Image (cartoon, rainbow, N blue to C red):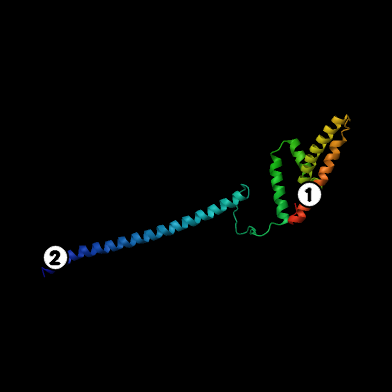
Amino acid sequence: MTEHAPVTAEKTPTANAEGQLELLEKRHESAAERSSEQKEQAVEKARVEAKEHAISTEAGGAEKDTKPATAAPKSHGVIGHKQKEASFKKHMKAVQAEMSAPSRTFSKFIHAKPIEKASEFIGGTIARPDAILAGAVVAFVLVLGVYLLAKALGYVLSGFETIAAFIVGWILGIIYDYLKSIITGKPS
């Protein structure tokens, strides 16, 4: 029996060491699992915070949205007329707030609905860029020619020549613009 006692004494510490080693390995694995779970939770928390920050930044620096689930879902389709108008009013208010009083008054005047509609109509019909450019170029060329001819023949110019030459050039520019839109099929 004396032989068995040393063997069991040797086995007991080894068994305890192996048990402790296994216990430590299990603790280490569970700690690693917990740390990976904690990392995943931290990543998810960071995502939520980043999304909330993006929402608050998108809202123009307003307070953070505490209930993102109740917010109206953003449509990814075509922007409607009401959305455009609301965005325009918001931006105009922000820009006008930074202007001086006379500039703000002028801005409010020129951005009034009747003034804007009239301006768009005139810009789309009468004051076409091609027509104005053609009017200016033709006026320059014709007035230069008429002036040189009048000076050589001894006539005095009345001043209406410039206006008449501009009108002729403007009409040519309108015709050019109209023909260009018919040929290309693109409204200009």
Query: Please, which residue is most extreme toward the left here?
Result: 2
Query: Please, which residue is most extreme toward the front here?
Result: 153
Residue 26 screen position, x and y as percent: 33, 62
Name the amino acid, label 1: Tyr
Residue 113 in view in this figure: no
Name the amino acid, label 2: Pro
Dot 1: few (<14), some (14–19), or many (≥20) neighbours within 10 Å? some
Which of the pair 113/4 is nearer the observer? 113
Query: Please, which residue is most extreme toward the bottom here?
Result: 1
For the residue labelled by badge 1, is the local secondary structure a helix, a strand or a loop? helix
Residue beneath the point at 84% across and 42% down = 167
Q: Quadrant of the N terminus?
A: bottom left
Q: Which residue is mark 2?
A: 6
Distance between the Cα atoms at labels 1 and 2?
Answer: 114 Å
Residue beneath the point at 78% across and 53% down = 179
Residue beneath the point at 50% across and 55% down = 45
Which of the pair 102/40 is nearer the observer? 102
- The quadrant in which residue 51 appears is bottom right
Q: Nearer the viewer, mark 1 or mark 2?
A: 1
Residue 95 in view in this figure: yes
Residue beneath the point at 43% across and 57% down = 38
Residue 141 screen position, x and y as percent: 79, 38
Side of 53 relative to 106 (left or right) = left
Tell me which label, 1 or 2, sits earlier in the chain: 2
Which of the pair 40/154 is nearer the observer? 154
Side of 76 relative to 82 (left or right) = left
Q: Which residue is mark 1?
A: 176
How many discs mark residues in the rendered view? 2
